[in-house]
Amino acid sequence: MKEDHVVLSERPEDLQKAVEWGREQKQKILNDKGNRIADSLMEKMTPLILKNSMKK
């Protein structure tokens, strides 16, 4: 499989900004995904936790 690469700029400072932006976007995506997983778990587990605590 052939991969295409795009050069955004020849200037190192522009390339550094692009890398930093990419890292920030990756972190935002990971944080969002983590939050969605945590919210989903809380939604599913809260009734079970409440049910178990009522039994005790």
Image (cartoon, rainbow, N blue to C red):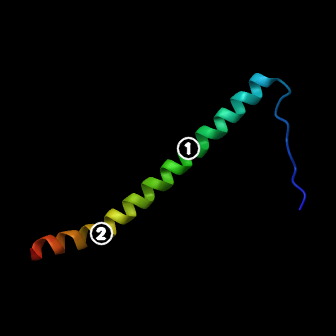
Q: Is 55 above or below relative to 10?
A: below
Assign a secondary structure to mark 1: helix
Q: Earlier in the sequence, mark 1 or mark 2?
A: 1
Q: Left or right of 48: which side holds 34?
A: right
Residue type, mark 1 in image: Gln
> Callout 2: 10 Å neighbours few (<14), some, many (20+)?
few
Tell me the SS state at disc 2.
helix
Residue in view at x 17 percent, y 74 percent: 52
- The residue at the point 39 percent across, 64 percent down is 40
Q: Which residue is mark 2?
A: 45
Vertical placement of 7 versus 14: above or below?
below
Binning the other alpha carbons within 10 Å of mark 1 as few (below 14), some (14 to 19) or many (20 upward) gives: few
Image mark for residue 18: none
Q: Position of residue 34 (x, y in %)?
A: 46, 54
The answer to whether 9 appears left or right of 34 in the picture is right
User: Residue 8 placed where, x, y %?
Assistant: 82, 34
User: Which residue carries the number 1 mark?
Assistant: 27
